Image (tube, rainbow, N blue to C red):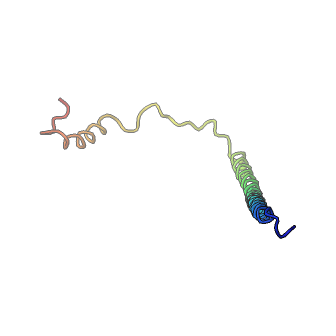
Amino acid sequence: KVGSDFQLPLMRDTLAVLMDRVADYYDERGKDERSHALTIWFYNQLLGQFSALSEKLQALVESLEKIDKAGIDEFNKKVAALGDMTQERVLIDKPLIGRREVEPFVNGLLAKLWENGAWKN
């Protein structure tokens, strides 16, 4: 009776389609898992690089802070070694350059911009 059974080719085709679908499903699932694993690996590598760079930058900041502190200490020592300067005063109550010196200079600059040098009018 098996030879004359008309459902065998139909079942064979159905099983072939089902097997193809199962194979496609697992192929896609495998691709997704590999892609996910590759993404995780990449970001872990990137995180490691950033961590190493952060450590180097932190070491650089610490060494610069030490150098800055040493410079400040040296400056403070030099200032402490200076004598008493309370008697030394600088008089700034009169300008060093007066109007008589500035006016001819400005006249020389601006006269070239106006006709006949009449920029004051």
Relative image position of residue 73 (x, y in whole percent): 74, 49
Give whichever of 2, 101 is nearer the camera: 2
Quarter of the C terminus within the rendering: top left
The residue under the point 31% across, 34% down is 99
Which quadrant of the figure has residue 104? top left
Of all residues shown, which one is farthest toward the left? Answer: 116
The residue under the point 34% across, 35% down is 98
Relative image position of residue 46 (x, y in whole percent): 73, 59
Residue 52 appearing in the image: no
Of all residues shown, which one is farthest toward the right? Answer: 1
Give whichever of 69, 55 is nearer the camera: 55
Give whichever of 58, 50 is nearer the camera: 50
Residue 71 versus residue 110 in the image, above or below = below
Relative image position of residue 100 (x, y in whole percent): 29, 36
Residue 32 versus residue 116 in the image, above or below = below
The residue under the point 74% across, 55% down is 54
